[in-house]
Amino acid sequence: MLNKIKTAKEFKAVNQTIEALIGKATKMGGFHTLEKNEALMLSSLSKLVEDYEDNILGLMPMKPKTLQQAVEIKRMGLKLTQAKLAKTLGMGAPKLSQILSGKREPDVVFLKAVHKN
């Protein structure tokens, strides 16, 4: 298990693991359905990502090139997890994750929610 994220590649891998755990919890009916080791892993990885975002990404001004990057920058600036952002936007965490990762095109519902918030 990592004790610190040092590279963008590690950051991406950790985020993918977090997204998988959130997806599993969502599919199963909530975070309480995760096994104890999965819940602990999710908590630990979330703290690593937060530390990386605050200490590494916070030092680099970023200019978004895509809508997804703009949303990610705003999310990090507000210090929201993807799950909390999804709730704020009124959508499921898996859908938001797919849109932000480029696996799914932004739809009108997403675009209106982002514009409104």
Image (spheres, rainbow, N blue to C red):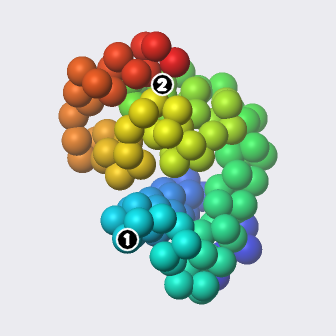
Q: Which mark is residue 70?
A: 2
Horizontally, residue 74 falls left or right of residue 109, namely right
Q: Do the residues labelled 2 and 1 touch (CB within 8 Å)?
A: no
Residue 90 falls in image quadrant: top left
38 lies above or below 89: below
Q: What element carries label 1?
A: helix
Q: Which residue is drawn at 52% across and 18% down?
A: 117
Tag count: 2
Among the two numbered marks 2 and 1 on one chain, the one whose residue lies closer to the N terminus: 1
Residue 101 falls in image quadrant: top left
Horizontally, residue 110 falls left or right of residue 56, namely left
Q: Nearer the viewer, residue 76 or 43?
A: 43
Can residue 117 be seen by looking at this rendering? yes
Q: Which residue is drawn at 26% across and 30% down?
A: 106
Alpha carbons under labels 2 and 1: distance apart:
30 Å
Q: Which mark is residue 28?
A: 1
Q: Is mark 2 on a helix, strand or loop?
A: helix
Residue 14 on image: x %, y %: 53, 64
Q: Which residue is drawn at 72% across and 61% down?
A: 47
Q: What residue type is labelled 2?
A: Ala
Q: Which residue is drawn at 34% across and 65% down?
A: 27
Horizontally, residue 101 falls left or right of residue 83, namely left
Residue 7 on image: x %, y %: 60, 58
Q: Which amino acid does label 1 sit on?
A: Met
Can residue 66 be seen by looking at this rendering? no
